[in-house]
Every structure is written in structure tokens, then in C-alpha cells.
Amino acid sequence: MIKPHIFHGIKKGPHIFFTARIHGNEPCGEIALNRLIQNIEHGHIPLLSGQLTLISCANPKGAQENKRFIDTNMNRIFSRKLTQKHDETYEAELCDTIMDAIDDCDYFVDLHSFTEDMPPCVICIDDKNETSKSMAEECPIKRIVCDTPFLTKKGTCMSTHYAREQSKPAILVECGQHDDTQSIEIAYQSIINILNLHGMIDTSTTPSPEHEFLKITGTIHNNKDEELIFPLMEREKIELGDPLLKTSNGEIIYSPVHGNLFMRNANTPVNEEYATVYDLHNQWP
Ligand SMILES: [Zn+2]
């Protein structure tokens, strides 16, 4: 069982919930949240208002083994139906605990990092909601990933999908590469900026840059009995018709998608994405 850290502000105010390490191999958010806990407990950062709920390590066993997950990718089962369906997995009960905390809060922020060495981004699937959008813009991160049917396809139940269903403004922050110490700073600065935005603390913030907006137009999946033949890690872009996968019968599958590539991982597990394909915009699309 995981137990959240809960802090109450001096005055009434919003209730915000931060979590990290839903994927056990992504330590930056946990380190950043633990720094915040220390700073609050030692009185360096007084909590002025509202309630702060923190689960700095959402997948303790995954963290201990430095693995993305033990039995199932927690960030794909954020629905009560799915945790019931997968109730034999290590992640199901943990996921229920996170959903309980989302039910109780007003705003939700989920901290992650990338396998690949690439710039951080904020994933804002709730891009019709002004609070979600302002939380995304407040992070000191250039790239904002907007919602598209590819992020919200059936069966992809991320933490922020669950939050959106409960009408809780939410963002997911990809802070940088898993083991890059800069990812910890990005996570921490994002947390501080968001708490300032909601008037819960009053500290100096990190200015956020001009944003660019990514619209995901497709994904490349690791399907069973198919082998990746596209030189994924060497290319920034994929074109329609590029040879993509080879089936176990030797048949070649050509790319049905085109665009810029990100979140590339050539060694992703079966049923996970090798990469995401996006178009770029200079405002909320
Ligand atoms: Zn993650």
C-alpha cells in the first residue's frame, strides 16, 4: 500500500494532487516531490492555502527494480473496469489508490520521463479546459502535446484520461530523459510554478518559454510477431510507405503514417509504442 503525504495550507484553497514514478524507472518526479516535502516540512516553503496531496512513488516495486512496470503498464489501466480486469497484477491496487486521490482532488499533475534523450514536454489531453491549459503553459517547458484521437484511443487509459473523465483539470509532464539530472530540475520547477499559479505558495518561479504545440497524428506499435525494420533511432521523420515492420512470414508492412517522430524506443515491450508521430503548430490547435 502507498500512503500519500498530505499538507494543509493556512487558508482554504484548492486541493492539488501530484504523483510520480507510475513507471518505476522514472525517478526524477519522485526526487523533485521529495525535495518539495523537505522544503515544506522544514518551513522553507510555507503552504499558504489549500491542500497538497503527494504520492512521490506510485510504483514502489517497479522503482526498487528500476523497471517501467512489474506486471502491467499502470499508465494504461486508469479505469475502474480495467483495474478490476487486471486485479491479479501488482499495479492494479496502486492504480486504484491513485484514482482515489484523483477523485478527492481539484487538480492533478502526473510526472514522468523519457527513455530517449529528448526535450521535455507537457501532455495536455484536456485541451478544452482553461485550467489544464494554464497549468501546461506555466511549466518551464517549450513543447505542449495536445489531444488527438491517437492519444485518446479506446483502451489507452492514462492517468490524465481518468482525471478528465472526473472533470479534474490535469496534465502529464514528461520532464526529460530518465537518468538526466536536469529532468529533476524541470520536474521541480514545474511543481513550483503550478503551486504559485494556484496561489498555494509564493516563491520565485522559472519563466516559461514561448510554446510550440504538438498534435499527434499517429503511433507506431510493437505488435506481436512483427519485427521493426525502420531505422527508428536514426531518423527524425517517417514518410508514408517507408518499410516499417516485417511479419514472421517475411511480409513487409509499410508505414501508414507520416510526420516527426518522438518518444522513440526501439526496445519497447509488445503492445507498447515504438514511437509517436506528430505535426507542429505555434498555437493551441
Ligand atoms: Zn512514464
Image: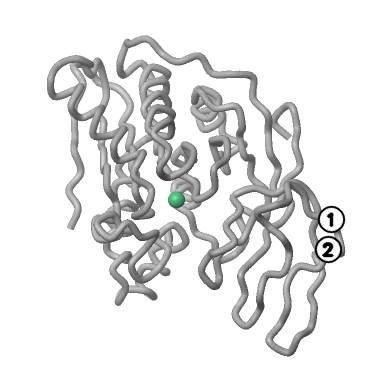
Which quadrant of the figure contains the C terminus? Answer: top right
Reading the image, the residue beneath label 1 is 239
x 54%, y 18%: residue: 208
| Cβ of mark 1 under 8 A from ligand 1 | no
Residue 137 picture quarter? top right
Q: Is residue 171 visible?
A: no
In depth, the one of 88 and 230 nearer the eye is 230
In depth, the one of 97 and 144 nearer the eye is 144
Where's residue 124, x and y in %?
56, 39
Where's residue 228, x and y in %?
67, 70
Q: Are marks 2 and 1 in contact (CB under 8 Å)?
A: yes
Cα distance, mark 2 to mark 1?
A: 6 Å
* 251 on left or right of 191: right
* 123 on left or right of 243: left
Disc 1, SS: loop
x 26%, y 31%: residue: 52
Where's residue 61, x and y in %?
25, 60
Residue 274 picture quarter? bottom right
x 44%, y 40%: residue: 168
Crowding at mark 2 (Cα within 10 Å: few <14, some 14-19, many 20+): some
Crowding at mark 1 (Cα within 10 Å: few <14, some 14-19, many 20+): few
In depth, the one of 168 and 184 nearer the eye is 184
* 50 on left or right of 143: left
Looking at the picture, which amino acid does disc 1 mark? Glu
* Numbered mark located on residue 242 in the image: 2
